[in-house]
Image (cartoon, rainbow, N blue to C red):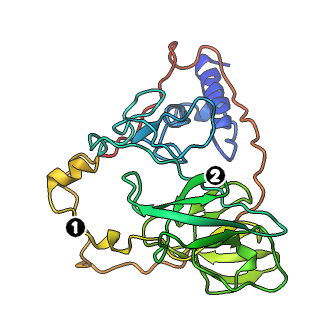
Amino acid sequence: MSVASVASVCRQMATLSLRTNTLPIVSSSALVKCPVQHQQVRWHNMYRVDMPKPMGRLSYRFKVHYPEDGQYTVRPLKSTKLAGRHPETGRLIIGTLGGGAKRNYRWIDWFRTGPSDGFLEERIIHVQYDPNRSSRIALVAGGEHLRYILATVNMQAGDLIRTTSHLPRIPVRPKEGDAHPVGALPNSTLVNSIEVVPGDGARFAKAAGTAAVVMRRVKDKVVVQLPSKREIALDPNCMVTVGRLSNLEHGSKHVGSAQRRRWLGRRPASGLWQRKDGYCGRKIRPVPPMITYGPRKEEVPMITFVLPGEGPTKKITPSTDRVS
């Protein structure tokens, strides 16, 4: 067997860990036609395996300095601006973030979990502006504890709100600001601060003026329509808050000037971008499929195959997709 045939077989073995379907073993007569193609696939995948992207719950705007003891507090916390860079590596991820006014972070309690045999009653102290999010926030007090939550449209100082984890046989009468399991609410109820997994905290419908709708029941799941019109099937024990979030005019306000965009922490974007005006028509896309959420699955470790002597000798730094 020649050196070229051995090199081709090695390239095919190297692509097994990055392809969903295996490649057939190529005979020695066809080695001249395909080694370049395999080499391009191998090099493309090698640089695109663990590429950092703007995703998940990682923020590239600022880094919050939480208390060292980890105890919840309502006092404003200090934050450091990241300007679109990764908080650990410092690599530029989002090119349109940077600058902005100095802000203090208000720690929002995303866990509206109450007792299963009764309810937790809290009083709203005041509703205030939060520079770190689009909706208003409310300072509530229950017993000797204070916490921040997202404020709904009609929430005012002095109101009483209730939180319970009880899942009754008959749906309850919803009241704005109260938190219930999604299975305890009737259909067509507007909800926000939706949990995906019971006890995991709010994940959906947290922006200003947004609200999801409880649509129907499917077997042991409750279907909720998000503000994006996508439907998700949740466990009935997932906690939600009744009502629509405050600051309805947020989406209709104009920025007004380029300097105000700087105050908001956004750098100038590319001048080549233009909003689609429908001149060339539009594409009617089907409704996205429903997503079913359940208990989190354990992560399966990735098996990687390493061939000694292949590729560069130094460590490869993944490239990034800069958004500019």
Q: Position of residue 104 (x, y in %)?
A: 39, 43
Q: Position of residue 177 (x, y in %)?
A: 58, 73
Please tell me in which quadrant of the rendered image residue 181 appears.
bottom right
Q: Which residue is mark 1?
A: 254
- The tag on residue 201 is none
Q: Is residue 145 left or right of residue 250?
A: right
Q: Which residue is mark 2?
A: 145
Contact, CB < 8 Å: mark 1 with mark 2? no
| As drawn, 77 above or below 168 | above
Q: Nearer the viewer, residue 22 or 129?
A: 129
Q: Nearer the viewer, residue 255 or 115?
A: 115
Q: Amino acid at mark 2?
A: His
Q: Position of residue 264 (x, y in %)?
A: 28, 51
Mark 2: secondary structure: strand
Q: Residue at x 69, y 41 (%)?
A: 24
Q: Nearer the viewer, residue 296 or 123?
A: 123
Please tell me in which quadrant of the rendered image residue 162 appears.
bottom right
Q: Residue at x 50, y 17 (%)?
A: 312
Q: Position of residue 271 (x, y in %)?
A: 17, 54
Q: Residue at x 52, y 74 (%)?
A: 211
Q: Residues within 10 Å of mark 1 (few under 14, many from 20)?
A: few
